[in-house]
Image: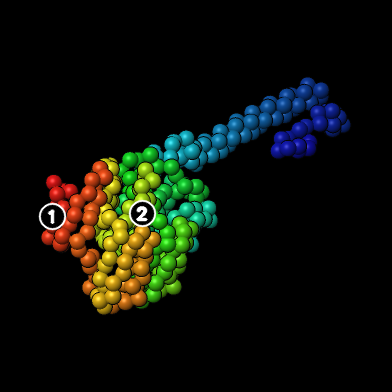
Amino acid sequence: MHTTSGYIHFDYKYILNKLEVNNLSKNTCKRFIYCKLDFEKQFIMKSTIQFWILTLTTLLVISCSNDAEINVLTINDTALIDKIEVASKEIIDVSNLPSSAKMVLDQDFADSSIESIQYAKGLGYKVSLFTNDESIIESKSDLFFSSKGEKLDDDNVERKAKRQRCFGFVFPIDFLMPDDTVITLNNNTEWSLVREWYKSNSGVKKLPSLSFPVNIRLQDGTIQTLLDRTDLAEVKDACKLNQPNRKCFELKLPVSFTMPDSTVIVVSNRTDYIKIRRWHLAHPRVLKKSSVNFPINIIFKDGSEKEIANMTELAEAKSNCKS
């Protein structure tokens, strides 16, 4: 008798000779061999059944363990995002994000800072962002990544609208930081400078201040000047309502402004507005704003003009735009 691959095999000729040598009859020998044969058949049948039970059990366990992953792979990105939204999540540190997700955030969302990261086990990540780019409709938005760190494409209208760009800045633009330093962005790739400032000043919660006036480019290519945050709000509110976001009117150039120290700055073209901005940046503690020198002419959207004699008439013109 010998064993091969877990099965027992008998050398029947050897057994028969041994039995005959011991003076047993051939019938006795045959009955002995038949018993052995019957034992081996039962042993092999039992081993085979156990083998298939083990195989089927293993396949079932593998199938069940992969079921969730298969479901994730077969649904579209928006459906997976919806699952992440409603799933139980734990807050994690940015160091626990997959490297591919961190790369997307660093390169494609340099204008934003991470507020929180939540992980839904077996599904993916929800990253809440805050942006300093005021050309984007909402300052807060969410991004979603798969468990492997792939950015998920979101077709949800409400979530997509938050990251919609209302207009483009005409660079350079300036930010006054909480410590009164100035960060100048010369192009759209330098937003990370603001984010890096906050990384170096991690205890600071105060937001940077966009310095006005700024020039912007609308979706139709039109260049407009935002004199203050009121102008900015007007343009962004129109975007939120999906309405044309051209200002009701603009100042006809040239025009002059008197600064708080009584100096006068003449704006002959749009690029000259930076002179007013830079004056305020050089005097960050001066809260009083520059004032326009009347009379001025304003140009409406339809190209018509009107002369404005004083601040009361200017306020009235702005009020009429809203009615």
Q: Position of residue 252 (x, y in %)?
A: 27, 55
The structure residue drawn at horizontal position 45% and vertical position 57%, both measured from the top left corner, is 188
Q: Position of residue 219 (x, y in %)?
A: 37, 45
Circle 1 sits on which residue? 316
Q: Is residue 192 left or right of residue 177?
A: right
Res 241 quadrant in image = top left
- The amino acid pointed to by label 1 is Glu
Q: Position of residue 215 (x, y in %)?
A: 35, 57
Identity of the residue furthest to the top in this view: 27
Answer whether residue 64 is visible to the viewer in this image: no
The structure residue drawn at horizontal position 16% and vertical position 53%, both measured from the top left corner, is 317
- The amino acid pointed to by label 2 is Ile
The structure residue drawn at horizontal position 39% and vertical position 55%, both measured from the top left corner, is 169
Circle 2 sits on which residue? 216
Distance between mark 2 and mark 1 Cα atoms: 25 Å
Residue 15 or residue 167, whichever sits in front: 167
Residue 266 or residue 135, whichever sits in front: 266
Answer whether residue 231 is visible to the viewer in this image: yes
Q: Which quarter of the rendered picture does the N terminus lie within? A: top right
